[in-house]
Image (cartoon, rainbow, N blue to C red):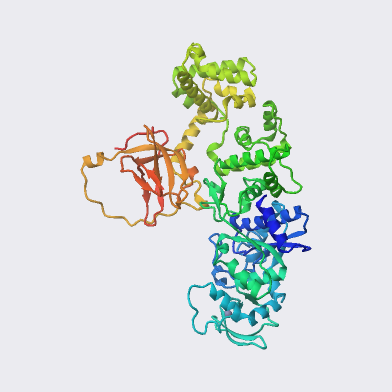
Amino acid sequence: MHWSEALARQVIERNPNKERYVCATGISPSGSIHIGNFRDTATSYFVVKALRKLGKNAVLLHSWDNFDRLRKIPVNVTKPGMENYIGCPYVDTPNPFDDIDHNAKSYADYFQREFSEELTRFGIEPEYRFQAEMYRSGAYTEEILLALKERGRIFDILDSFRTQDAEEGERENYFPVSIYCDKCGRDTTKIIEYNETSAIARYACKCGHTAEFDFHKDHNCKLSWKVDWAMRWRYEGVDFEPGGQDHASPSGSYQTSKIISKEIFGYDAPVFQGYGFIGLRGAAGKMSGSTGLNLTPRALLQVYQPEVILWLYAKNDPTHFFDFCFDDGILRQYNEFDRMLQNARNGKGSEIEKDILYNAEITGREIHTVPMGWLVQFGSVVNFNPDVLEAVFNKLGTPYLKADFMERLTLAKNWLELCSPESVNRLRSARNWDYYNHISESEQKEIRILFENLSKNQYNLDDLNTMLYAVPAQAAGVDINSLTSKEKKASQSAFFRNVYQLLINKDRGPRLFWFLYALEPEQYLALLDFSRPLTDEERKETQANQENQTKADRKPGSAERKSGTELKEFHVTVQPVKDQVDLDAFRKLDIRVCEILKCQEIRKSHNCYKLTLDDGLNKRVIVSSIKHDYTPEELIGKKILVLANLEPARITGVNSDGMLLAAMDDERNTQVIFVDSAIPNGTALC
Ligand SMILES: [Zn+2]
């Protein structure tokens, strides 16, 4: 049984004949709602779906806690003066992004609208409750008066969860409610007098204002969190509500509110489910700066279909950790999703799988399982032109239609461009003379033979594959069967690498026979024909390329800085020149040119990248704390200087074998020293 159904059955058992079941979810609009919070919504939503499947009437009640106080300003809110509103409810704090969304009426409204729009993409349409409006309309007056009357007992319940003893007089002075000041709007108030019979209080605010507050008539106050939660369970008749793992612990909010609910409001607490955190794998690249903490569902929807996102939430038990992937793990997730969907469509899936897919389904939408890996591989080759791609699929014998793959093609394009620019395969526009001139004569001969074979013959898919593997032997004038498999492999892999370099400027690419078969020969033949002399156009282009490359090397990273910020100004306190060393001491340092092959995030580190380098002899790994200064895209393929004989060290759990050279200022802003790409790997600095 799927976990959502197990929870639904508990809900029914708790109250078997209820006409309408209420599954709640609640979020403070304290900033952009991220994918971790979305688990709250998704968990409750799946229980609603399970209840409906069991023939029950159920509603998803989404509470916007816009009457909570503004605690701190999120990092992405930079509007000046916002800190003056700390202590005010979100609903009374101005829209921090009025330049982006004029229509949002307040801080709360801005983030509420952002999230509500995202929810519609998932087909989730909750019934909304806005807590500021509820409180201020006086809807909760009866409950507030009850809580005030029972404040001694509430204090005792809260106290029973505390490890410290209460101080003298604390119980008498405890009020389970905070009043928002009439004058400054903040909750920095304290009740200084209270009449139990009339329920009229006098409060003093930190701003100096004091006033009378009649709980029968004045509504600008809010119950404290654990009381508020319990009160709303009764008010709305909540049957199910999830909460973060921190709420689920034995001393967490849920346990406290559960007792308050029963003892004070006479209501059995709803069925509860704690949920765990969600992670991010791979560099999100341009998509989210450096962390996933603020990643919104909207950002995910740039690369994930909404069904796949729901499927990940549904597939994993709420207490389990899982990752959204920005590396090629996302392709495996799509594959797994497609496989499960196809199995279910063929009547082969298990019951649980069917339930998972039922939860992921969005009414009115249909999923076409066009493999994401293909869209990524072929999409970039045909420059994401859907008509050309449709023809390619047709030729490959998998006639997917444009209408079926358009949505995924856009996502594949986004993924490639935003998260994995190094995976883009784009046909060159002109022959790669630079490369051709540096391969051996026998390798050039292989290219010539390939060109002749391809221009003279029309191959079917299988013959094309056989032909490609036979080219090196054909060029060497030997019988392919006379070669050992080791010899065969070596010559073939060099040949394939050369073809990829000539076609797409990379050492590897999509399966070559597929790739050539999918494309029209006129798209690539000219790139393999070096019998024609270098044209003027090619000469110009090669020159322009070299100049661009040199420029890029000269001003590394200046084109696009992380988070769009400009290269920071360097503040340097110039130090006196250090003690002299002799030339021998300097010569002992092995400083050499290395090329950055890979740049990976390190899970536990905020500052460091793991860089895989080519030092001219071998691959080596170094750890470098330049994450705040560069994106992986700005590093991969660049050449740098590395102190290669530095004693290896273990940094953030990774063995670092060397250190790159960089300029660093007083505030640890870093400028890596880049070297012209024309200088071979392994060149020594002297
Ligand atoms: Zn005040």
Vertical placement of residue 374 versus 14, above or below: above
Which residue: 67% across, 46% down?
A: 352
Work out whether residue 254 can be spotted.
yes
Give residue 629's position: percent from left, percent from top: 45, 50
Quadrant of the snapshot with the C terminus = top left
- The quadrant holding residue 242 is bottom right
Give residue 678's position: percent from left, percent from top: 41, 33
In front: 155, or 137? 155
Is residue 580 found left or right of 665 in the rendered image?
left
Is residue 657 found left or right of 173 in the rendered image?
left
Give residue 262's position: percent from left, percent from top: 65, 72
Work out whether residue 68 can be spotted.
no
Is residue 64 found left or right of 84 in the rendered image?
right
- Report the number of discs: 0
- The quadrant holding residue 108 is bottom right
In front: 179, or 550? 179
Give residue 329's position: percent from left, percent from top: 56, 42
Which residue: 44% across, 24% down?
A: 438
- The quadrant holding residue 205 is bottom right
Q: Quadrant of ligand 1?
A: bottom right
Vertical placement of residue 249 versus 684, above or below: below
